[in-house]
Image (cartoon, coloured by chain):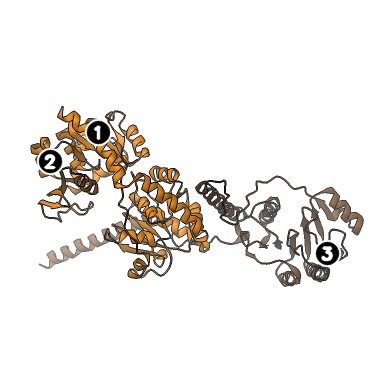
Amino acid sequence: MAEAARGFARRGYEVEILTTCARSHFSWANEFDDGTSEDQGVVIRRFPTVTSRHRLKSSGLENRVLRGGRLSASAEIAWVNSRFRVPELYLHLLAEARRYDVIVLSPYLFWSTIYGAQVAPERSVVMPCLHDEPYARLSIVRSTLASVAVVWFLSEPEHLLGHRIAPDLPPRHCVVGAAVEVPGSYDPAGFRERHGLERPFVLFAGRREGGKGWRELLSAYGASLVGDDASFDLVTVGVGAPEIPEGLADRVIDLGYLDAEEMPSAFAAAEALVQPSANESFSRTLMEAWLAGTPVIASAAGEVVTWHCERSGGGLTYSDDLEFAQCLRFVAEAPKAAAALAERGRKYVLANYTWETVLDVMERSLTGLVRRVRR
Amino acid sequence: MRILIVGTVPPPGGDAAATLAEIATKFLAEGHDVELLSPDDRSAAHRSARLEGPLFALRLAWLSRRFEAVVLHFEEGLPLGPRAGRLWRAVTLTALAAALRMFRETTVRFDAASPIPGGIGSRAMGEIWSSVSHVVVGNEKDRDQLVSLWNLPEERVTVEPGRPVARTTLPRGWSVGDDEDPRTAVLDLVRARAAHDRAAMAARIALGGAIGPAPEAPFAGDARRTIDPESVARAVIALARHLAQRIAATDDASAGR
């Protein structure tokens, strides 16, 4: 979102980002100062978050949602309110909504999107970043998607999921995709040296949590070590506690959270990117790996990543631990063929997911909306 | 009885391998101790080794100290490769015949005559036929030849025609044809190889104790997340004890006061 905002600013639009003072989406603690600042031509307004004091009630509601139980409308609102709220952002929107031609809200799960979309639905665009998960099936999500002027999806599978979740989507919904910055250069040797990585490795980049397939990846990687199939270490970067099992402690290396400038070299240094998550609406890491010329091994359970792998002809998918081990063997034993697949992925990213391409699609969608709003 | 089975067992697949696996399973069910020795390092056998030439005969002689019976399957490269010269063949087969005589019971099996060094009628093979207690062949023609050429009693030669078994041949490389889509072709290879590994696991289960325990993964999933009722009960009891002690200590203190 921030990069899209900067892209629109570069194209001469006046853009403001309304966001929270939080850094972590786990704690929602206010770590940044509230107030207004400017960055690369974009005005940034930060508002403090308020978190629920009723932890027990919050976790009870959360468990009910995750079990797929039906919640009453008031219970759904209580659940949305129980995570975090940004009352001042809402008040700002109430007062200033008409000052904006368009208000883009994302992702679907946040209080700011669900409440913000109600302020001026006729000029609101929701970019939901949907995953096929219990939260997405709440009726409040369906009504939010149905109420706004435009819905932007990041991929075709997410678009189809949107139809399943909200059959009454607004007619002006579309797939805009997402974009990735093409790095000017990579420094794989420097990356290995800076982080003391002596053996070849495959990379997992993302949140180390259940919803992202981290535990499944550890299990598949552990299984691949039987019979010495895995000639690679597993390096992981990102947030969340990786909780590496004792048996894998010498093969799984956690580098923690890396700066954005360091990430391209991490992708370039890896022998392959592994993407075990089934909950992806776009999967930016796939694109970044392909751009770096790095092969991709992804879980076939993820509709979106499978779609990218099939469409590009550049990524391998696995259905179980044995196939995962064989994908690793392929990368180890046929590095040239693996690099050729990655090259197909790189061409796919450059053709579909550069900022210029994606901003063009977004701009066309917004131009039509603005015309209607001003009428 | 302790029985040694020598030959390729799954994986890789194929009729003969499947038949050997079946034989092993049958012996196990009858209560025998069975060990498998395979020339293919992909087999789910106790061990694999190059089973060729006089060294193989020596190995078999050595193993005869531990096993009363042996089932030897003649197949490509076992007991001799196709390029073995006449002298090498004669030395190997003589040594092999001597080794086979050291077992109480010996069975030689072959599905077709092609892996028999020099053919069924070669002079060096005569030593083998005279030293085995039973021969299992794949067709009537081979049985007739054995009986007529070597005067083997008919009851010592059994015909077991090969039966159709789904073949799963392990692809050796990752080569992709020019006319193939590379991703699809690689994924096909990945799946074929994984199917092989799956067959190995199935064979391991089917052959049970005959191939020893499966190698363990250093991490096999989320066992830590399961709740063990016993440990929960222990924790509850410990908590109850702790509370009871606290209450008793408070009572003592009150009484003392």
The answer to the question of whether label 2 and label 1 lie on touching residues, with beta carbons closer than 8 A, is no
Quarter the C terminus of chain A occupies: top left
Q: Quadrant of residue B49?
A: bottom right
Q: Nearer the viewer, residue B85 or B6?
A: B85
The amino acid beneath tag 2 is Tyr
Q: Nearer the viewer, residue A220 or A13?
A: A13
SS at badge 1: strand
Q: Residue at x 64, y 65 (%)?
A: B48
Residue B228 in the image: state x and y as whole percent. Answer: 38, 55
Q: Nearer the viewer, mark 2 or mark 1?
A: 1
- Indicate the chain on which mark 1 is placed: A
- Indicate the chain on which mark 3 is placed: B
Q: Residue at x 73, y 67 (%)?
A: B52
Label 2 and label 1: CA atoms lie apart by 20 Å
* Residue under numbered circle 2: A90
* Residue under numbered circle 1: A150
- State the residue lying farthest toward the left: A95
* Chain painted orange: A
Q: Residues within 10 Å of mark 2 (few under 14, many from 20)?
A: many
- Indicate the chain on which mark 2 is placed: A
